[in-house]
Image: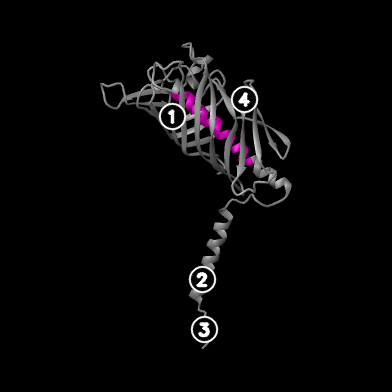
Amino acid sequence: MKSRFNLSQFFVLALFFSLLMITSCQKENSQTGTDEQQVEASMASSEADSESEIVFNGIFDDAIGVNEEVGIGGTGVFGRVAACPDVTVIRLNAPAPFPVKVILDFGLNGCVGSDGHLRRGKVITVYSNRLLVPGAIATTTFDGFYFDSTKVEGTHKITNTSPPLGTQPPSRQFTVDVIEGKLTKPNGNYIEWNSHKVITQIEGLGTNIPLDDIFRVEGNARGKVKRGALIVLWESSITEPLIKRFNCRWIVKGRIRTVRVNTATTSPWVAVLDFGAGNCDNQAVIIINGVPHQITLP
């Protein structure tokens, strides 16, 4: 008996293959191609990881820098001569000082800080206690927040993982997690980023001046970047501890190794981001297959 292939079966098959093609196009598409394309994909992953690192590092500085009640005060946008956000403080269990919600409102039109960047929208942080107290947690979310033209989304969580107060010698450490972070460009390109870092203070513990504080950053991240038709998934690890100073808005030293997902262990297409020798500037170098590429940090 011959089987009959009717029109409805044709449309079902056509729909199946259309969906299959769409799904295939949406998968990470950087594992094959010319050397030039391989470099482009590796550059995209490393640049996306570094941009995410810088933007969310700024969120850490702002959260801890609001004032001495919730942090140490005077860092991030609050380390400038004139901080531009309106600050609203809401006691969530008044009259108890904590937990407390702090809203940084940069306005609908935004304001330009002395660092030259335009910020608009709201950054909302809930503090369980003063961040200098071991066990304290600060959780930050965003409401229509833009850093220049980039929309910032996700959850940023700081946990004070220092030993108990009074421990000698004194030490201070924070664990910082970025959960479902996303940076979206006006043209539809985006970066998705999840990060787990441990930040340990290595200088400045003996003073009450935040701008002499220096920290060592260790940890890893994973992400996905879309640039036009190019989609790259990657994983990154800090191979040389990053050095961050509250008197500089960029990471000043350290290396991050970025590997695209499913890349062979012997592949030369691995990116190493080098932040430099300790100078406070927005320059960094990405090394791919032994070739350095200069980049400018946001």
Tell me if residue 54 is in the magenta stretch.
yes
Q: Nearer the viewer, mark 1 or mark 3?
A: 1
The picture places residue 279, in percent across and down from the top left corner, at 64, 20
Q: Which mark is residue 250?
A: none
Q: Residue furthest bottom?
A: 1
| Quarter occupied by the C terminus | top right
Distance in Å between CA atoms under marks 3 and 4 = 70 Å
Q: Which mark is residue 158?
A: 1
Residue type highlighted by circle 2: Phe
The picture places residue 244, in percent across and down from the top left corner, at 56, 23
**Camera-side residue: 264 or 58?**
264
Q: Residue furthest front?
A: 168
Distance in Å between CA atoms under marks 1 and 3 = 64 Å
Query: Crowding at label 4, few (<14), some or many (≥20) Cα neighbours within 10 Å?
Result: many
Magenta stretch, main secondary structure class: helix
On the question of residue 133 being in view, the answer is yes
Q: Which of pointers 1 and 3 lies earlier in the amino acid sequence?
A: 3
Q: Is residue 155 above or below residue 34?
A: above
**Camera-side residue: 18 or 48?**
48
The residue identified by callout 3 is 3
Distance in Å between CA atoms under marks 4 and 1 = 22 Å
At horizontal 44% and vertical 22% (from top left) the residue drawn is 64
Q: Nearer the viewer, mark 2 or mark 3?
A: 3
Q: Which image quadrant is residue 102 in?
A: top left
The residue identified by callout 4 is 253
Residue type highlighted by circle 4: Lys
Distance in Å between CA atoms under marks 2 and 4 = 58 Å
The picture places residue 194, in percent across and down from the top left corner, at 50, 39
**Start and end of the magenta stretch?**
44-63
Q: Which of pointers 4 and 1 lies earlier in the amino acid sequence?
A: 1
Residue type highlighted by circle 1: Ile
The residue identified by callout 2 is 11
